[in-house]
Image: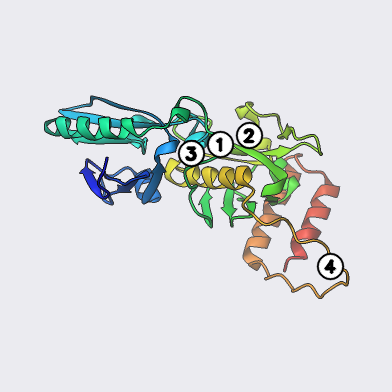
Amino acid sequence: MNRMGDVLAGIHATWEFESDSVLIRFERGIRTPKLFQALGERRIPHEALASVTLAPGKRGTVVLHAIPRPGADPLMEAAAGQLRDGSDPYRLVLPAERETLAEYYGDELRALLTPEAKGPAEKFLVAAPQAPLHFKAYDGKASFDGSRVSFRWFWTGASSAKWKAGDQNFHIQELNGVEWRSPDVFDGYLRLLRRDNGAGGLTAFPPPRQSAQADQDPAAVVFGLGYGPVHESLPFAAAVLGAVRTGSAAPPDPAPAHPVPVPVAARRDPADIAERIRHLGDLREAGLVTDEEFTAKKAELLAEL
């Protein structure tokens, strides 16, 4: 592929072939998958690709598929094979009459693949979605500012275990990975996998792969009923995973030699605090929270006013 800027326009996306990469620009429109719209565009270095295929598609189309190497793209690593074909950002769907042109570009791109393409990538080669990112899960709001992941629980959906644990805040240096289970299945969730104490292992509460317990895990948010859709939760998971694997966030600031005044945190909405206390009261009445736990948590909430 000798020329830069060659363009192959398909359905929902356009591939621009450059000397060292493929720039994928996704269209915007009501028929374009929401994940594509959220991604906007992605640059895929040739070294991130394992192979290129061309196959018949549905209803008079062909599909040019650039298959990434394992470990090359944080988005696909987070997805872990759970994306439907229609939401795979590496598939370019074209009208069947453009098959010859697609075959030409597929051959050209295939010829540029490196010998290392047969093996997994040692590091991420495709950029992760950029923070800040946030989305609403069923039981809380998840936010990521590039360095920290925070979960703020919703009184309408969070379990008593999460209410008792309180809102959560994790620096990426505390994490070793992310587990994303698609909201397209019944028990979807996003779980943060935490580093073991100095051992380099993983901890999660409860242990990973026990999705039925994600609603009890303060390091996880659960999906469902339209909460945590793929186009919001997957880029979020990929951004966190990218930061964890690359160590791109700055380490926590060390304690200063001389104490400095700490700015006063912004006050919470009194109505929100009142609603949380009311929900705690309901949990106490149901026997899910003890009187001591209710009193301690109520004091914490009132201190935020």
Which residue type does callout 4 highlight? Pro
Sooner in the amino-acid sequence: mark 1 or mark 4: 1
Q: Is residue 58 above or below residue 48?
A: above
Q: Quadrant of residue 138?
A: top right
Sooner in the amino-acid sequence: mark 2 or mark 1: 1
Determine the residue positioned at 51% across, 34% down: 77
Q: Name the residue under label 3.
A: 73
Q: Residue 58: horizontal and vertical position, in percent?
A: 21, 26
Mark 2 residue element: helix
Determine the residue positioned at 32% across, 42% down: 33
Q: Is residue 86 above or below residue 269?
A: above
The residue lying toward the viewer, choosing from 115 and 198, is 115
Which residue type does callout 3 highlight? Asp
Sooner in the amino-acid sequence: mark 1 or mark 3: 3
Q: How far apart are marks 2 and 4 (CA)?
A: 38 Å
Q: Distance between the residues labelled 1 and 3?
A: 21 Å
The residue lying toward the viewer, choosing from 10 and 138, is 10
Numbered label tally: 4
Q: Name the residue under label 2.
A: 214
Q: Mark 1 points at which residue?
A: 189
Mark 3 residue element: loop
Mark 1 residue element: strand
Which residue type does callout 2 highlight? Ala
Q: Nearer the viewer, mark 1 or mark 3?
A: 3
Determine the residue positioned at 82% across, 44% down: 290
Q: How far apart are marks 3 and 2 (CA)?
A: 26 Å
Q: Can residue 190 be seen in this view?
A: yes
Q: Do tag 2 and tag 1 residues touch (Cβ < 8 Å)?
A: yes
Q: Name the residue under label 4.
A: 256
Q: Do tag 3 and tag 2 residues touch (Cβ < 8 Å)?
A: no
